[in-house]
Amino acid sequence: MHWPELRTRLDDYEKLMRLDKPIGILLLLWPTLWGLWFAARGMPHPMLLWIFVLGTVLMRSAGCVINDYADRDFDPLVERTKDRPLAARRVSTREALLLSFVLVLSAGALILPLSQKVWWLALAAVFLAGSYPFTKRFFALPQAYLGIAFGFGIPMAFAAVLDTIPPGAWVLLLANVFWAVAYDTEYAMVDRDDDLKIGIRTAAITFGRYDVAAIMVCYGAALGILVWAGWQARLGWGWYGGLALAGGFAGYHYTLIRTRTREGCFKAFRHNNWLGAAVFAGLFVDLTVRPYFQL
């Protein structure tokens, strides 16, 4: 294989894993970092942080490959996805399955030094990532399932740090489910017309004309649960400041989605990176920075 051909093939693999679109990595990473910082009550061990960050990249990449494999007959019919490598038949299904296997295996190798609880949770995480794409065939709110899959790093983080999963971990996971329904419904609003034609189920279709209201309710529920989680954990002003900033971002998203334009909805979806970052920033300030000023 000559270099130009190899380079083209590598570019297709990169697009298949969505490494050229890191927003998905960030939306998966932020709740994982919430879990790590909550569990460690501050900065987790650097090696543990490295394992979870790299594992997030690998598992998100694997999830994208599996998603495109599952949707390989639907994506050619959707304007936004018709040029994806599997949809355009530039990558074979065999290559995609092999690539996803290597990515999952690599992610699994990372957690070998961790406890058996983490191993079992990792198996559940792989099942969630592999089964999510198929929920769009029958489940009216696949975005909620995505929220569980994208937030499963939270209980894994608690298990890695504490070797147990306290109730607070599941509270954080619930907050992430509501957040995921909000941002992924914005994403689904971009493709709603195409999804209706091909029979895919999404929250944007299920909510119908109440889609914008439902998104804002989900934002409110997510932030409300995080307020309660912070109160239970006796967090301080840093945490609530981060949540206030996140609430401001949610309000900004309303201005983008209220007219339901494709451009506005997609911009709101991408902007959720900053909402997740604001929550983490508040947690970081409260648990890692603020203690130094109390000495």
Image (cartoon, rainbow, N blue to C red):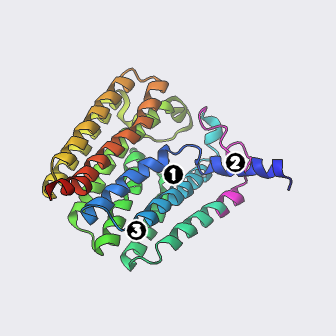
Disc 1 secondary structure class: helix
Q: Position of residue 289 (x, y in %)?
A: 25, 53
Which residues lie in the magenta part?
Answer: 79-98
Instruction: Say what amino acid the circle numbered 1 marks.
Output: Pro
Disc 2 secondary structure class: helix
Residue at image mark 3: 48
Camera sees residue 280: yes
| Residue at the extreme right of the image, as rendered | 2
Give the camera-side residue of 237 and 93.
Answer: 237
Residue at image mark 1: 133
Give the mark nearest the N terminus, 2 or 1: 2
Camera sees residue 138: no
Disc 3 secondary structure class: helix
Q: Is residue 92 magenta?
A: yes
Q: Position of residue 193 (x, y in %)?
A: 51, 29
In contact (CB < 8 Å): disc 2 and disc 3: no
